[in-house]
Image (cartoon, rainbow, N blue to C red):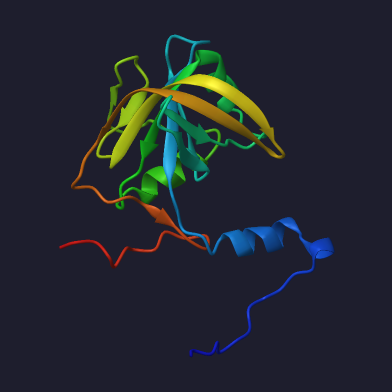
Amino acid sequence: MTSLSTPPTRTAADAITPEALRATMGAFCTGVVVVTALDGRTDGTPLGFTCQSFVSLSFDPPLISVSPARTSTTWPRIREAGRFAVNILADDHAWLSDRFARSGTDKFAGVDWTPSPNGSPVLGGVSAWAECTLWREYDGGDHTVAVGEVTALGHDIGRNPLLYHRGTYPRADWRES
């Protein structure tokens, strides 16, 4: 039997703050995606944002889910476009994650991308991507739970995903040489 050197942190139900929830949920390792689309309000300017809240939801029909923050200024423009791509970042894409997490910058400056079958940007070198049409949206508190129906996809078996854990991007020791 193994003993812990320090007991786990416990928080009473009435003391669950956003900080306590973030610290606890940060123990779960997630992948990182960038959601992209072409802006329907303009001449097709590419849009995108970083998202950790991503999941494969259903095989039949083929559905995925992303959860942008309600404060996102990019998601309403992607919603209006009605279709988007989810780019699963590769383990050397921490810089892309950071870039697409910022507001008020040209996120696509110097970023290689190609259009998906319906035109959404697929970022160069990603480990996988899925193009979707917006299927449904649900209230998710301070986030929107957006469900997309997958219309096209692809992956590169030689690219490992970018991981996010406790507020940082740990280098994966499990990668094959």
| Viewer-closest of 124 and 147 | 147
Q: Is residue 102 above or below residue 48?
A: below
Number of numbered tags placed on the structure image = 0
Residue closest to the eye, 162 or 74: 162
Q: Is residue 166 visible?
A: yes
Quarter residue 8 falls in: bottom right
166 over 129 or under it: above or below: below
Quarter that holds the C terminus: bottom left
Give the percent coordinates (x, y) of residue 164.
45, 56
In this view, the residue farthest toward the left is: 177
Instruction: Report the side of 161 relative to 1 (left or right).
Output: left
Q: Residue at x 19, y 61 (%)?
A: 176
Task: Write the residue at 84% across / 62% down.
Answer: 14
Q: Position of residue 41 (x, y in %)?
A: 53, 10
- What percent of the width, then of the height, locates residue 96? 38, 43
- Left or right: where does residue 69 sit relative to residue 113? right
Q: In this picture, is 156 found above or below 162?
A: above
Q: Is residue 106 among what the camera can see?
A: no
Residue lying furthest right: 14
Q: How far across and down, in percent of the image, does residue 40 sit?
A: 49, 11
Residue drawn at (32%, 63%), measured in percent from left and top?
172
Residue sitting at x 75%, y 70%: 11
